[in-house]
Image (spheres, grey):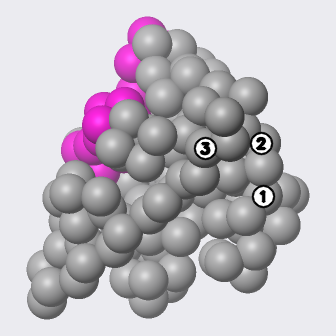
Amino acid sequence: MFGMIKIKVEETEKEFKVNGVVLEKEHLLAVFPGDDAEKALAKYLCIVPFLHEKAEHFHKHHKLGEHAKWGVDKSHEVLKAIGVPEEAYIPFMLACMAQAETDPDELSDLAKAAFGKCGDPDHNEEDGHAGHTVH
């Protein structure tokens, strides 16, 4: 049987609902500063499978701020609601990158900025900016 992934996005002034899962724009814009809300959502969806797979690692080895922690924690619910099977993670991420008009290198840099590097002493959960210190 051939299954299709269907993503229904509804938008209000303060949030998106992705297949019924509420994603607050405040968090998306903090994780991906400088983007509009739609582009921030597309970039977040690009990394949802990665965040889902590596959530335990992020919580154990990264000092996540409020917005970064939200992004990691929400990834499970979003991935389940979308219904992306594990074998489709890479194609899903590539399709989202096309929608976000980004590439793997840029997305990797954005994810490192938002969620920090493993054991990165520069991240500070008190700064309120996506879990890393702004220089």
Quarter holding residue 25 = bottom left
- Label disc, if present, on residue 90 of the rendered structure: 2
Range of magenta residues: 58-77
* Residue ID for mark 1: 94
Tell me which label, 3 or 2, sits earlier in the chain. 3
Quarter of image, res 16: bottom left
Q: Residue 62, relative to residue 70: is it above or below?
A: above
| Crowd rating for badge 2 (residues with CA inside 10 Å; few <14, some 14–19, many 20+) | some
Quarter of the image that includes the N terminus:
top right
**Percent coordinates x, y for residue 80 in the rendering:** 38, 35
Q: Residue at x 65, y 77 (%)?
A: 100
Q: Main secondary structure of the magenta part?
A: helix
C-alpha gap between disc 3 and disc 1:
18 Å
User: Going by the image, does 6 lie left or right of 130?
Assistant: right
Q: Vertical placement of 8 versus 11: above or below?
A: above
Q: Is residue 78 visible?
A: yes
Which amino acid does the dot numbered 1 rest on?
A: Leu
> Magenta includes 46?
no
